[in-house]
Amino acid sequence: MLSWINPLRIAQAILSLTTIGLTAYEIASLYDEWSYSNVIYYMLFNGCWTTAIAVPYLGLAPVAFPRFSHEVAIPAIELLTGGLWLSGWIALAAMIPSSGACHYSSCHALQALIVVGAIQWATFAVTNTFALMDLKNSRRNANNHHDDASPEMAVADGNANGITTTAAADTAV
């Protein structure tokens, strides 16, 4: 495992908690139309998904539970989470007023939410790249191991050639 992945996972968790806080502030400000926007609720979902499911699974499964760390599940969750963040911050950026028309704290919170969402997407873009490279390498290594003769095959070939089982096992290992 790469040494910088765990600090990046911690940063992803902090950014998603920041998203939860900003969206909670936006929802709590009942005086504007953004409090009831579906995009805000979508960003709240992104923060909760990342904090509760994605980061714990991506950070802990390969280390603590390698049996539950499937080689396809990790890139799939990485791609899903990165796609959620990309669509969330772009939808939010397309809907808010221009920065010149933004004169109240709720609007500034939305601008901050866009920045946090874009940074969060960038962190997942980086980890997506490495997850896909790892998947490609694991598939390539699996194909190479299937081409090589296994030790069991060497033992079976040794028995067919008149070599005893223990000698064939010693030469195979």
Image (spheres, helix red, strand yellow):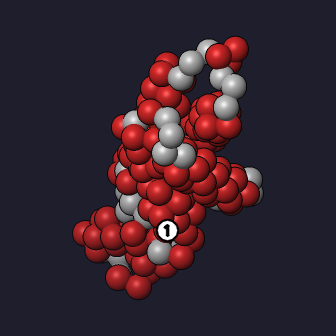
The residue sitting at 38% across, 54% down in the picture is 73
For the view shown, which residue lies furthest in the left direction? 160
Question: Residue 144 location in percent, x, y?
Answer: 43, 46
In this picture, is 158 found above or below 51? below
Q: Quadrant of the N terminus?
A: bottom right
**Res. 112 image quadrant:** top right
Q: Please report the residue visible at 46 percent of the width from the left and 41 percent of the height from the top.
A: 35
Residue at the bottom extreme of this rendering: 166
Is 18 or 36 nearer to us in this picture? 36
Placement of 145 over or under 159, stated as above or below: above
Front-most of residues 158 and 74: 74
> Which residue is depicted at the point 42% across and 78% down?
169
Q: Residues within 10 Å of mark 1 (few under 14, many from 20)?
A: some
Residue 154 percent across, percent down from the top left:
36, 66
Position of residue 32 in the picture relative to residue 155 (left or right):
right
Residue drawn 53% across the image and 60% down it: 51
Q: Position of residue 110 (x, y in %)?
A: 60, 34
Residue holding disc 1: 61
Q: Is residue 111 visible?
A: yes
Q: Is residue 141 visible?
A: no
Amino acid type, mark 1: Ala
- Whether 132 is drawn above or below 142: the answer is above
Lateral position of residue 2 relative to residue 162, left or right: right
What secondary structure is found at the residue carrying circle 1?
Answer: helix
